[in-house]
Image: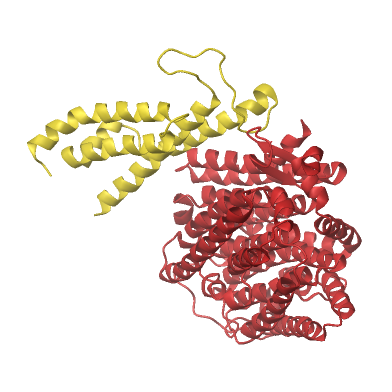
């Protein structure tokens, strides 16, 4: 049964997490299991991706209960791609965590919770049931609460409080939206909903539910008026945690928005205009927020918000090419944002501070490492041929076709500010004459670390930099992939058929 | 709360409550009950014992750290979900059943093992939380 492979990315994470729980007090074993397990899950993700690519959409009905009554797990090209990206980032962050997370945090179950988080992400990408999606979001936020508070520093708890409050609120709104949707259609299966929602007479109620979904997912993916929790909390946990949060947590919100608004709520001009407006404001306000920061992690946090705008913009433009642009940007962004936060962790390890004013002289001291760190920086800006360039090109072309010049202005503004910020970081952190900073007490600087630790910190950055370079130079393949995803998303009958089977459609 | 009535009663209540929690666990497949509620009742049994006899005595009674029940329960539930994949090539979590009912317990299938897993996880989690809070208070 080839379909069983759909569930394997989820099952392997449960398996790793259980093994890690058994080794609760043996931190050394935990490290080994986590890294080996991440390699295994990368292997499974690659197999799932190749199978999905060759065979088309795969579906498994958990428990053997047929859709729309059981819970379906669906791997279309979009889901399989995100599973692959999760596995890549997961592997990198797992190695990086082993190198950087303090033993005190590891002893309190950092690694098991980290794998529960990956479990939630994989589940959210694969599920074909809207309530099950809610459950996976709960798995994600509960794990992320633990990761963000573990260690119990004052700043961490303050950040966690904001993060916690707004995310719980988002979950409640999401749940309300599910309830409304269930009330009007009597179904929770997304493929089934796709058919039923289109036939509902009461469009007002459908719109209410759609807007509730948009708000719930909007908070989670840090859209324009709802993003304040993100820059308030992402700089507080250790860099490894920020890396997985920055790379994947907001993206799962974006994934949910794209999935729901291409499958269930389709062809509503009012909503499309709202989404476009939100995207424009997200681009501008995220960029403006980043401008005034001095802490490099805070700059990256605001840049996450800013760049969410690109993906939502692609969704709002509706055309196939624009959605392909959004998907391409999503692929590029997951890898680059994960890498940026790990780079900031490396900078912290070298100098002991995140403040741009105090940093400096990195290029003189570590020329090779600086060049390595340049790759994610310049990929983020999208200097051609690096990875950020191609999706922006697609988005701008499509906005021109719609003759929506405000959006083009917003995209260019955000790109320009990103460029300015990266140039500023480059000159301040790398080229500026380095100050002599007061030595931190009880802090292991990078040059004092053992070779093993150094490798654990630098190897994941190199790995993700290579992936970024591949996305940039192999843009042809990625564009092909993004086009196929966009094609599947815009022609959703294929997804519906694969979940419900042929005869269900006929009835 | 070191009253002699509670102390004496708790010694008898512990096995009774445990038995009741098993009953609720087994009842849960078709009727209200199941692993979650059963686990909570079992946890209450130990909490009551700890109230009457002190935390140290209860810990001595349980012997293992309650946190250890979490991975054990998870592993049991996980294996019961995997069983249909390897045993019959059916999707994850499909219920597979022994053909004949056993005496007292009734029909036995993979769902029962899943529920026992939940039962253990719930006991583990609630006791770990309560013991930790009691210790630090």
Q: Report which colour depicts chain A.
A: red
Which residue occupies the extreme front position in the image? A201
Q: Which quarter shows the N terminus of chain B?
A: top left
Q: Which quarter shows the C terminus of chain B?
A: bottom left
Which residue occupies 86% across, 72% down? A394
- Residue A382 rendering spot, x and y as whole percentages: 81, 74
How many numbered markers are drawn? 0
In the image: residue A293, left or right of residue A480: left
In the image: residue A506, left or right of residue A370: right
Give the quadrant of residue A154: bottom left
Which residue occupies 87% across, 43% down? A54
Foreground of the two, B78 or B134: B78
Seen in the picture, residue B6 relative to A453 is either above or below; the reply is: above
- Residue B61 rendering spot, x and y as whole percentages: 26, 31
Foreground of the two, A369 or A118: A118
- Residue B132 rendering spot, x and y as whole percentages: 31, 49
Foreground of the two, A278 or B79: A278
Seen in the picture, residue A236 relative to A500 is either above or below; the reply is: below
Residue A452 in view here: no
- Residue A493 rendering spot, x and y as whole percentages: 82, 51
Seen in the picture, residue A41 relative to B25 is either above or below; the reply is: below
Q: Report which colour depicts chain B.
A: yellow
């Amino acid at each position: 049964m080839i379909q069983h492979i759909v569930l394997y990315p989820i099952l392997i994470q449960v398996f790793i997490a259980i093994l890690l729980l058994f080794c609760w007090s043996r931190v050394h074993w935990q490290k080994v299991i986590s890294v080996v397990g991440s390699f295994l899950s990368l292997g499974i993700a690659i197999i799932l991706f190749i199978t999905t690519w060759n065979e088309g959409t795969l579906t498994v009905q958990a428990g053997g209960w047929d859709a729309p009554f059981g819970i379906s797990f669906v791997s279309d090209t979009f889901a399989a791609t995100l599973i692959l990206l999760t596995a890549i980032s997961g592997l990198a962050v797992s190695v990086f965590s082993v190198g950087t997370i303090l033993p005190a945090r590891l002893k309190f179950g950092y690694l098991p919770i980290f794998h529960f988080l990956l479990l939630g992400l994989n589940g959210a990408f694969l599920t074909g049931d809207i309530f099950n999606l809610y459950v996976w979001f709960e798995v994600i936020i509960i794990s992320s609460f633990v990761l963000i508070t573990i260690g119990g520093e004052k700043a961490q708890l303050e950040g966690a409080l904001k993060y916690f409050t707004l995310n719980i609120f988002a979950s409640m709104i999401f749940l309300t939206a599910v309830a409304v949707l269930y009330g009007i259609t009597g179904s929770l299966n997304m493929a089934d909903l796709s058919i039923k929602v289109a036939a509902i007479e009461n469009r007002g109620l459908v719109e209410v539910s759609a807007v509730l979904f948009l708000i719930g997912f909007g908070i989670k993916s840090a859209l324009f008026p709802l993003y304040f929790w993100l820059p308030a909390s992402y700089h507080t946990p250790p860099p490894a945690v920020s890396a997985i949060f920055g790379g994947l947590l907001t993206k799962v919100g974006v994934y949910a928005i794209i999935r729901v608004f291409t499958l269930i709520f389709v062809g509503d001009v009012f909503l499309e205009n709202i989404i476009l407006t939100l995207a424009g404001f997200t681009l501008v306000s995220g960029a403006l927020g980043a401008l005034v920061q001095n802490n490099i992690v805070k700059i990256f946090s605001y840049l996450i918000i800013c760049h969410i705008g690109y993906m939502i913009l692609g969704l709002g433009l509706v055309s196939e090419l624009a959605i392909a642009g959004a998907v391409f940007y999503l692929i590029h962004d997951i890898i680059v944002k994960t890498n940026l936060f790990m780079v900031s962790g490396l900078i912290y390890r070298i100098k002991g501070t995140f403040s741009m004013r105090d940093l400096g002289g990195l290029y003189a001291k570590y020329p090779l490492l600086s060049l390595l760190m340049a790759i994610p920086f310049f990929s983020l800006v999208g200097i051609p041929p690096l990875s950020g360039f191609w999706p922006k090109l697609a988005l701008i072309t499509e906005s021109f076709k719609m003759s929506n010049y405000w959006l083009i202005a917003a995209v260019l503004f955000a790109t320009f500010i990103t460029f300015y910020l990266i140039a500023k970081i480059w000159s301040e952190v790398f080229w500026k004459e380095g100050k002599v900073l007061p030595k931190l007490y009880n802090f292991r600087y990078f040059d004092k670390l053992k070779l093993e630790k150094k490798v654990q910190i630098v190897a994941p950055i190199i790995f993700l930099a290579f992936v970024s370079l591949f996305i940039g130079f192999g843009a042809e393949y990625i564009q092909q992939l993004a086009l196929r995803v966009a094609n599947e998303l815009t022609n959703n009958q294929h997804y519906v058929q694969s979940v419900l089977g042929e005869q269900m459609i006929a009835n | 709360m070191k009253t002699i009535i509670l102390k004496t009663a708790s010694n008898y209540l512990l096995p009774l409550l445990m038995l009741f929690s098993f009953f609720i666990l087994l009842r849960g497949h078709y009727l209200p009950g199941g692993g979650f509620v059963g686990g909570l009742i079992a946890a209450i049994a130990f909490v009551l014992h700890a109230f009457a006899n002190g935390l140290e005595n209860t810990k001595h009674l349980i012997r293992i750290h309650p946190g250890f029940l979490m991975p054990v329960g998870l592993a049991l539930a996980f294996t019961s979900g995997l069983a249909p994949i390897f045993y019959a090539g059916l999707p994850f979590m499909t219920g597979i059943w022994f053909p004949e009912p056993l005496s007292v317990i009734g029909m036995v299938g993979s769902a029962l093992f899943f529920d026992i897993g939940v039962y253990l996880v719930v006991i583990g989690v609630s006791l770990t939380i309560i013991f930790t809070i009691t210790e630090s208070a």
